[in-house]
């Protein structure tokens, strides 16, 4: 299921078109994605934004959940939870939680970010160990990056053929450089109607999961919400497609092209 949220991150790194000082989301926003693996309706993933506090600091608390359904669940049961607490003003994460259960494989960890000490402490609750990382102010976790990018890039600054980069920390592999290429705009047919989107292509590690570095194609809505609409990926075995399947509590009107 980590692949699902990496895909969602990729989709929203595409959200690089926020207007200056204009938030793309609010508390109460809920997004649902349906993932198909081959002919199977394999998984669902959701993201929900709430108001919260951490150390008396007002934050957004986002909970992401993913699970397999139908026949896919018979062959491979997945129940995953990802959570992030991040600053309402600058989007910096304070805490990240990852609980994974995938066919007998489990992960239980959390990361605390301390910007005064420029340190992040990863607590591996399953293995009973801690890992310390040196961080800079621009660090993001897998979920906070989704929302940070929606608020901090502008459509008018996107240049076809150029790259967007972001530093991520979400597991014990350390800080990861996320990189993707902007490919322009395209209109997609969705269950909601036609939606104009920005299209991107991320550069990913080939071999383990994806067939090649350019195996992903990604689309995000070209409106003030900047939400993921679709992704297509060629995996090392098979292919996967993710589509926006439901939404609620959007801050702005979802733009649908009327025929």
Image (spheres, helix red, strand yellow):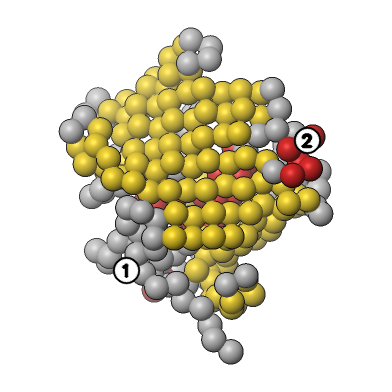
Which residue, given by chain and number where applicable, does mark 2 sit on? 74
- Write down the quadrant of residue 101 in the picture: top right
Judge left or right: residue 20 versus residue 124: left
| Residue nearest the observer in this picture, 170 or 188 | 188
| Residue nearest the observer in this picture, 157 or 146 | 146
Query: Is residue 206 positioned above or below 126 on the image?
Result: below
| Residue nearest the observer in this picture, 209 or 8 | 8
Judge left or right: residue 137 versus residue 32: left
At 53% from the left and 41% from the top, the residue drawn is 65
Name the residue at the front extreme: 70
Callout 1: 10 Å neighbours few (<14), some, many (20+)? some
Question: Where is residue 203 shown, x and y percent of the image?
Answer: 61, 51
Q: Quadrant of the C terminus?
A: bottom right
Question: Where is residue 188 shown, x and y percent of the image?
Answer: 62, 74
Regarding mark 1 in the picture, which secondary structure is present there?
A: loop
At 43% from the left and 48% from the top, the residue drawn is 48
User: Residue 19 got which mark?
Assistant: 1
Judge left or right: residue 112 versus residue 235: left
Question: Where is residue 151 shown, x and y percent of the image?
Answer: 34, 58
Q: Visible in this render: residue 216?
A: no
């Amino acid at each position: 299921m980590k692949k699902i949220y990496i895909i969602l991150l990729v989709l929203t790194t595409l959200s690089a078109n926020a207007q200056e000082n204009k938030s793309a989301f609010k508390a109460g926003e809920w997004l649902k994605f349906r993932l198909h693996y081959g002919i199977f309706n394999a998984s669902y993933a959701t993201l929900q934004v709430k108001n919260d506090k951490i150390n008396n600091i007002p934050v957004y608390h986002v909970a992401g959940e993913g699970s397999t359904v139908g026949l896919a669940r018979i062959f491979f049961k997945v129940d995953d939870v990802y959570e992030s607490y991040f600053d309402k003003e600058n989007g910096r994460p304070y805490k990240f939680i990852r609980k994974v259960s995938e066919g007998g494989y489990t992960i239980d960890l959390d990361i605390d970010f301390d910007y005064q000490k420029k340190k992040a402490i990863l607590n591996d609750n399953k293995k009973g160990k801690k890992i310390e990382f040196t961080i800079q102010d621009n660090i993001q976790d897998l979920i906070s990056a989704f929302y940070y990018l929606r608020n901090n890039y502008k459509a008018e600054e996107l240049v076809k053929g150029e790259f967007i980069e972001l530093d991520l920390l979400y597991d014990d592999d350390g800080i990861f450089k996320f990189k993707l290429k902007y490919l322009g705009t395209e209109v997609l047919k969705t269950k909601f109607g036609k939606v104009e989107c920005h299209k991107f292509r991320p550069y990913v590690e080939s071999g383990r999961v994806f067939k090649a570095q350019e195996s992903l194609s990604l689309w995000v809505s070209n409106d003030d919400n900047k939400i993921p609409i679709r992704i297509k990926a060629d995996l090392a075995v098979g292919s996967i497609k993710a589509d926006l399947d439901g939404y609620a509590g959007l801050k702005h009107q979802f733009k649908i092209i009327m025929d």
